[in-house]
Every structure is written in C-alpha cells, then in structure tokens.
Amino acid sequence: MKKILSVLLVCILTLGILAGCGGSTPAPAAPTAPADGGTTPATPATPSESTPAAPAATKTDVVLAIQGEPTSLDTHYPDDGNMRTVTWSVFEPLYKLDGATLEPIPCLATDYKLVDDLTWEFTIRDGVKWHNGDDFTVDDAVFSINRVIDPDYNSQIFSDFDSIDRAEKVDDKTLRIITKSADPVLLKRLGKLDMVSKNFTEGKSPDEMTSVAMGTGPYKLDHWTRGVEIVITRNDGYWGEQPVLEKATYRFIEEVVTRAAALRTGEIDIAVNMYPEYVSDLPKVFSGIGTETSWIRFNQFSGMMRDKNLRLAANYAIDREALADALFGGYAHPCEGQMGRDGYFGYSDKVSMYPYDVAKAKELLAAAGYNNERIELLSERGRWLKDGELTEAVVAQLREAGFNIEARFVSWNEWLDTLFDRSKTPDLQFSCTSNEFFDMDRTYSAIVHSSGTQTGVVNAEYDAMIDDAKSELDPARRQEIYDELVQKLYDDPFAIYLLVLDDLHGGAANLNWTLRQDSRIYISELSFS
C-alpha cells in the first residue's frame, strides 16, 4: 500500500511542470577612457603577460524571485509572508533576533530594564532617521506599538502582541511597554513589531498605507510596479553598517519551475522555495530546517468537523512519512503529534506522530455516523513549498480512508480573507504557520486560543491554559502547562498536523549567503564574489 501511495504522490507532483523563461542580456562593458584625456575612446590593449585583464566588477544588485505579490506594505496589518520578505529590509523593530543564536539583540532600542513583572522600559537609539530624513523618536515607538494592538485597527497579527496592554512615553529617550500579565516572550515578540513613523502614518487610511513604506532600515522603497516587481535601494543615511548591495529587485514568479529556469539562465539571483527535484540543476543550493509547519485547520464553529471522531479519523488517515519522502525528498519532517518542532520552547516529548492507520480512520468515521457527506478543503497554490501538491496528496489519502472530500483552490487574497473571517470558515483549510518567536505561545495564541486570528475552535479550557503559560515566568512550570495542553490537543485535535518544512532556496553560483535560523532574508546579509 505504501509503495502505491508513494507512486500516487509522485504522479501528483509531476502534473503541470512546464518549461521556464529565458535569460537576460549581459550589460555592455564600460568604455575605456582615452589616454590623452580627450573624448575619443582609446584603443583597447591586447592582453599579454604585462597587461593582465582587469577583474570583473563585483555585482552590486540582487534580483529575487518570490512566490507572489505582497497584498500590502503596511507592515502592521497583513499576515503576509510575501510582504515580509520585502519589509524585513525596509523596516526595523526595537529588538530583533540574532540569526544564529535566536537570542533577542538590540536594534532601534539600545537596552531595556524590567521595572516589575508588567513594566518594561526601553531606551531608543540615537541618530536614527526615517527614510525621509526625520528623526526616529519615542513618540514613533509608542505610536507603532499602540497601533498594532488597537482593536479598531483589526491587525491580522494582533494575537502576536495581545499580551501588551499599552505603550507610553517616559521622556525623549525612554518608553514603557506595559503588559496585561507577565510575558516571558516579549523581547521575541518585538522582533515582529516594526516601527513606523507617526508623522507619516497617522491619519492615513489603510488603503493609503498599502503601497507606501517609510522605514529606518538599510534599504528604502524605490517603486512598486503592480504585477511586475518591487525595487528597494540602499539607504545611504542608515544609522548602522552600510550594506554591500546597492539595490534589490523582487519579482513575483508563482511557478517554481519558472523560478528555477530564471535562476539557471541568470535572469535572477535567488529563487525562493525550490522543489527538491530541481536541486541538482541549480547553480547553488541553500537549505536548513525552517520555521514553517504545514497543517489543515478544522472548522469547529459549525459543520461536521465539530465531531471529534472525524477529526481524529483525518489524522490517522495521513501517511506523513510518505508525504515527506515522496513530495519533499528529505527536505521536510513529519509533525510529532503537535505543531512545530523540537527546539521551540513548549514543544513536548509526551506525544508522537499519529500512526498511519486507515482501518482505525474508518472505524472512527463509522463511530461518528459519517454518511459520505461532502467535505470541502480550501487551499491555494504558490505561497509555500509544494502547497498545492501537498493539498492534493492529503485529499487522496483522506479519500482512501472514506472521506468524501474535494479541494477548492483560490487566490492568495481570497485565501487570506477566508482565514481571518470566521463567517467564511470552510470545513477544512490548508495553511502553513511560521513561529518567529520559537516559543509555542505563538502557535497556540494564534491558532488555538479563541481570540487567535487563525483559530477554528473556541474552548474555554484551552484559553485558560494558554493564558496561564503566556504569563508564567518559571520555565519549568510553563513546560508542564504545555505538556498537558499538547496531550489534550492530541486526543482532541484542532487540526491535521502535517510537516515541518526545510528552507530550500536556489542561488547564483557567486552568491554569498548564510541562512538564518529564523528564515528571514535580509538584503544587507547578501553579497557576491
């Protein structure tokens, strides 16, 4: 059976692979200056031992192919990975994560002190300017934090910061963040909370903020040509170390085969989210364990998936090892009965992967009284590595277990709208979730807690446990709470826990790039040989 299933998955994978696009024409060499200082070009010298050829100029711009066009550049509003790939180099937070150690390090704040369990004081950095030349101030920081947590603003990333009660100004160098309860994860949270200019942002409607970007980062927005590209250029007034590259161009290429072809021909320098089967044909490969976990949300607000037996049946129906092997060739790892991976605080060793057991899945379907009712799985294509193929493979496995299930693929914008609008929640919805905090609070607050922006369940007991863990400063006690919660969510799952994906990118042969543990792509960390 497993061999047959693997063949099926490979067939799903290979459907629709098409030829890619062509390369670009190299730029002409600069003319040689005349020896006499006149306007007539000098005759080029014939190469010889005494006149070695001049070394090629080091490349100073980079072209990246990302999976789709951002929905907005308002860094506080959408939960949009395509946007963040751009804004990571344009905006900055008070604290950020070290790319190797994942420890919080100062950025626009130079230090902090914990006044009491609920009160944090931060000192802002001197000499920081916005891209328009204005000074970065405490007022900007206070405005940025209060903007994200304002319920009326309705940010899609609100649940990442819902432990914050408010921010307030102390003096021209100091601000306070007051939390609702003790928050052991606050510094890591702040790494996702970019600062925006109060003068530039205040009073503008959400629509006005969609296509503009005023940051303090090492790069600034040059232009956004809808449907084509976004270009950022080096910020010569940057407060920190000047990056090597002068310009970055983000092109929107949804099809992975087209990204791979463009990389091979030299049209682009980085192709994100490559397929494992293309690895041998890429000029250079960059890979490492990533932050994305694929999962399928159950709708427990209404419909059939409120039945626990159906939800358990779906988890037993999935052969995760076959999915990882056949679709990802070793660049993905089965979820061990929970979301996320080892290394996140709160990850538990008390549960393991659901066994692949079609017979048990069928027994659970019968216990639920399932009578072949139609079930819809909503998904999209192009945002994550093999998201469409993985969806189709899951559907095939669920059908084998007896589910009458159909996949419906929608645009990225419609997918996002559905994810965050509970009135539109389908029976099942495919998703991938990153954990930028490397702490299970991020996962549970966003997709299990009833106030979470991606949740499909309302459960007062889960809410209380998540809230308790969020405010517990004793690491041992926090882990105990998560161990107990994990067991409950294993016995009564809120989702199909699928795979943890590796980062897998292609790059030009002369690209210098060390992947970060937090999976971010900072243009300032790139260079060419």
Image (cartoon, helix red, strand yellow):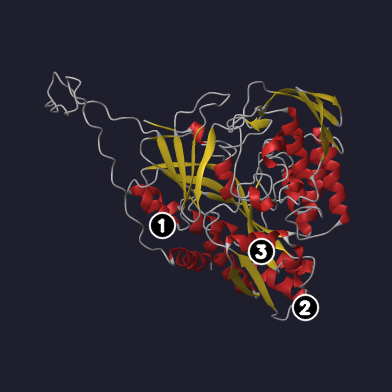
Residue under numbered circle 2: 369
512 or 488: nearer the eye? 512
Position of the C terminus, as image quadrant, is top left
- Of badges 2 and 1, the one in the foreground is 1
* Residue shown at 57% from the left, 64% from the top: 411
Residue 429 numbered mark, or none:
3
On screen, residue 268 versus residue 461, left or right, reads: left
* Residue shown at 12% from the left, 28% from the top: 43
* Residue shown at 76% from the left, 63% from the top: 422
Classify mark 3: residues with Cα within 10 Å, few (<14), some (14-19) or many (20+).
many
388 or 421: nearer the eye? 421
Q: How many marks?
A: 3
* Residue shown at 72% from the left, 56% from the top: 454
Circle 1: element type: helix
Classify mark 1: residues with Cα within 10 Å, few (<14), some (14-19) or many (20+).
many
436 or 342: nearer the eye? 436
The answer to the question of whether label 2 and label 1 lie on touching residues, with beta carbons closer than 8 A, is no
Please determine whether, in this image, residue 285 is positioned above or below residue 234: below
Circle 2: element type: loop
On screen, residue 21 versus residue 52, left or right, reads: right
- Residue 53 visible in the shown view: yes
- Residue 161 visible in the shown view: no
Please determine whether, in this image, residue 438 is positioned above or below residue 371: above
Circle 3: residue type: Gln
Residue 444 screen position, x and y as percent = 76, 49
Residue under numbered circle 1: 257
Residue 141 numbered mark, or none:
none
The answer to the question of whether label 3 and label 1 lie on touching residues, with beta carbons closer than 8 A, is no
**What is the C-alpha distance between the residues marked 2 and 1?**
44 Å
Circle 3: element type: strand
Circle 1: residue type: Val
